[in-house]
Image (tube, grey):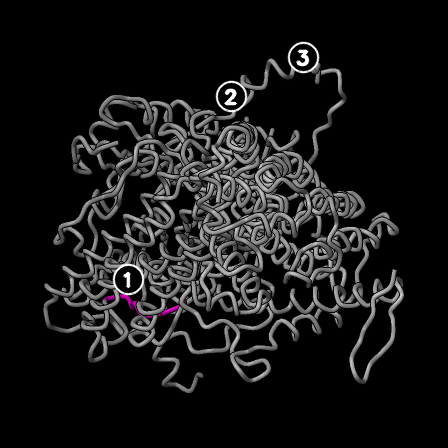
Amino acid sequence: MGYEVNLPFLEFTFTAWQILIVKLLVILTVVPVGALAGGYALHKELGHLQHRLGPMYAGGFHGWAQTLADGIKFIYKEDIIPASADKRVFTWAPAAIFVPVLMLFLVIPIDRSLIVEDLDVGIFYLLAIGSVGVIGTLMAGWASANKYALIGAVRGAAQLIAYELPIVLTAAAVAMLAGTLSIVGIVEAQDWPFLLWPPGLGFALFLVFLIGAIAEMNLPPFDMPVAESEIITGAFTEYSGMRFIFAFFFAEMGHIVAFSGIATTLFLGGYRPIVPWGPLEHIPGIIWFMGKLFFMFFLIIWIRFTFPRLREDQLQKLAWKYLIPVSLVLVLATGAWVLYAPESIWP
Amino acid sequence: MATTEDRFTETDDLTNQMSVENLATQEMVLNVGPQHPATHGVFRLLATIDGEILTDAEPVIGYMHRGYEKLVEARDYRQITNLVSRMDWLSGINNELPLALAIEQLMGLEVPPRAQYLRVILCEMNRILNHLMFFASFGAELGAITPTFYAFREREDIQRVMEDTTGGRMHFGFFRPGGLKEDVPRGFYASALAGVRQVIDRLPDYENLLVGNEIFKGRTIDVGVLDKQTAFNYGVSGPIARGSGIDMDVRKDEPYLVYDHFDWEVSTAPNGDCFDRFWVLVHEVVESAKIVEQAIEGIPSGPILGKVPRVVQIPEGEAYIRTENPLGELGFYLISDGDKKPYRMKIRTPSYNNVSCLPAVLRGTLVSDMIAILGSFFFVLGDIDR
Amino acid sequence: MPVTERVSAEDALERVRSALGDNVTELHVNHGHVDLVCDPAKLVDVVRTLRDADGLRFEFFTFLSAVDRTEFGGGDGEKAGGLEVLIHLYSPQYVAHVTLHVPVALEGSTCPSITDLFLGALWHERETHEMFGIDFEGHPKLVNLYLPEDFAGNPLRRSFKLPSRNIKEWPGAKDPEEAAAGGR
């Protein structure tokens, strides 16, 4: 398979391999840059939520280079590996955490044609890859030879098992509504008003998905695996320098951006305008997508810094006693809607 | 909300089916501290945990022991003022007060009314500072870091008034035997009133942010229950005792200075859990603000230092003077043999007694609860180790 | 516990006298608090009575410490005494205070533990043990609280001199007279 470029000054054909490499390079650049930008947005939003200004000096204009400077500082930090750690596992754990986050971005459509790979089973792929990172967390926790790290890793694994289910079930309901597993297909199947249709059901699915996503990203109020006032940073207690930012900061930021993107695609209509109205259709899809993504990002950060942390048993109770039954009911309701709702009231 | 016992009974059936008792489990000793984010200082807790449940907890202290009780024996009384303000570094001026009172009582000094009023105002403002600090740190320990910054913003206004008055931000060194170091600066009343009124105005919002939050309630209600009898037995005082339904406040029971001139209430809560301790703490801020307002309204004019001999030399005798520190009962048992230095001074600090009952409260709780309990015991390391 | 009755120091003294009888050797009012001297052998009974007797109810444990009076009153030793354990209790119900002075031997000092009555004494007795070298019999775990396990000496005894002050006196002026005379 080839891809032909026909421009007056540029006329050649990419091979499949070349395309793949270009795409991977794009992902490898976009994700860290996105994480840095996300980190800056987080600092700023957090600052203004707390009556502060946030970073103001680095780089001159409103401290735009703050996260870049932080990143450089981390590069210069010493990479400490504890003497009793399992060195191979310890060194590879950050990669096992970070690479799945990168892979999430492969199937998120930024615009109608701006997608690395439109898989037929895109949503299935997203859910599968989204939970691989916990293997890295477990590796890190076990290899650190630290009790806090171990507790954090075990908490992380337990949490993933509990919150994976609501996410999968709500995503399945979305796929049922759209009638396809392809992400682009799901975006195309959605129409205005994205969340309110089917009545109430869409919004309920969105809420359950959001709670599950926040829990899976280990963000407050569900951040027990990294609860800094209890178990320091959980599985990453012993990490420092570059390993720490890859395992913790980049992975977390990448996760937030990726899940904001996924929520945008599944529930907010992705790259499509919020209202199907003439002039709005002319605004490029990438702007719609980024706007919606930023809204989701803002929402997640807002929640993150407002609520106190739940307790481990309360977290499990919330998942198994409330979220999972609710999402099962939602799946049933969606199925009933798809089967029995009269054709005329479909958008 | 489920207590630990409930959790056990709830899981009992499941446990039997899976015959977990056949699995080999092992207790693990988790060393919390001396450097740990939740201990606000070098405090160590040897926690024996079974899974996430604490089967035993042993506080280890002394990392900051500075031997004040020995040091004061080699210093004269004016030097001690600066020493004792470093015990509970969040409430420096409240630490200086009992020392000044003890010297005055043993020497029979008269303190002019204006100085007494100003002492009340400064002490209560310092109490607000201290309580807001713990308000901030408790939220942060439960994972809500935003209230921290709100509390710090309010603290800053009062802190500035204290700084303008005394020249210090933490260790004020402002109380002298017989009165104060100097009078308050111009504009003190207006800025102090503005500071405390702002706290009263904004506190309900902050309170709602935490106390009104369901997660916060879930984390604190019925967690770390300290019953009345245990509290008495350990000599627990201050907001922690009042959170266990003990209506005990030195300012009300044995009013010193001019506390009996003001109209205010002792805040108490009946259950003795983390939530009640926190609730009492927040409400004491409001009561303190009330006292400050009334004291500023009724302050007389006059000298700020009574007749004090040039050399502070205490006649032979001994007395125990206690005051209500923000964290509880702070008392000095001062023994003098007629010298310029104390012969012996036993310092009874509130955090010391309060923290000594931690093992009794912690046993059987979860690791996450341990953090909530540590946070709700409002202790300052310098006050424990002194 | 709300205050039910405010008892004056003299009334409290009478109540303590009638409750304890001849268990105490000395009883007087000092700065509004009841001061009593009691024998170590009778300490536990005395404290129990003070805690449980009606009309007294000294239920709040304030502190336990000790004082070494061997250098009391300067060098001549006229007023000097021995080692004594201090216990302060407070009655929240009647707003009364009592200070117990328990004389103990200077060498091989022992005193019965009151931890069975007041759990708060656990730490106070450990601290007094390391600072004064007093053994509290019946304490469940009498190990050092502040000091390292291998610390030699009992810091709060008068015989334990602060090393820095031993070598050099405090350099600054201690009072205005000295300052005027040229001290710093």
- Residue B173 lies in the magenta-colored region: yes
- Residue that numbered label 2 is attached to: B5
Q: Chain of mark 2?
A: B
- SS of the residue at dot 3? helix
Amino acid bearing label 1: Met
Q: Which residues are magenta?
A: B170-178
Q: Are the residues flagged by discs 2 and 3 in contact, CB closer than 8 Å? A: no
Q: Amino acid at mark 2?
A: Glu
**N-terminal of the two: label 3 or label 1?**
3
Which image quarter: residue B290?
bottom left
C-alpha gap between disc 1 and disc 2: 42 Å
> Per the image, is A6 magenta?
no
Q: Quadrant of residue A60?
A: bottom right
Q: Could you say which disc has been placed on residue B17 in the image?
A: 3
Q: Where B46 sits versus A54, above or below?
A: above
For label 1, the crowd category at 10 Å Cα-Cα, with few meaning under 14, some 14 to 19 and many 20 or more, is many
What residue is disc 1 on?
Answer: B125
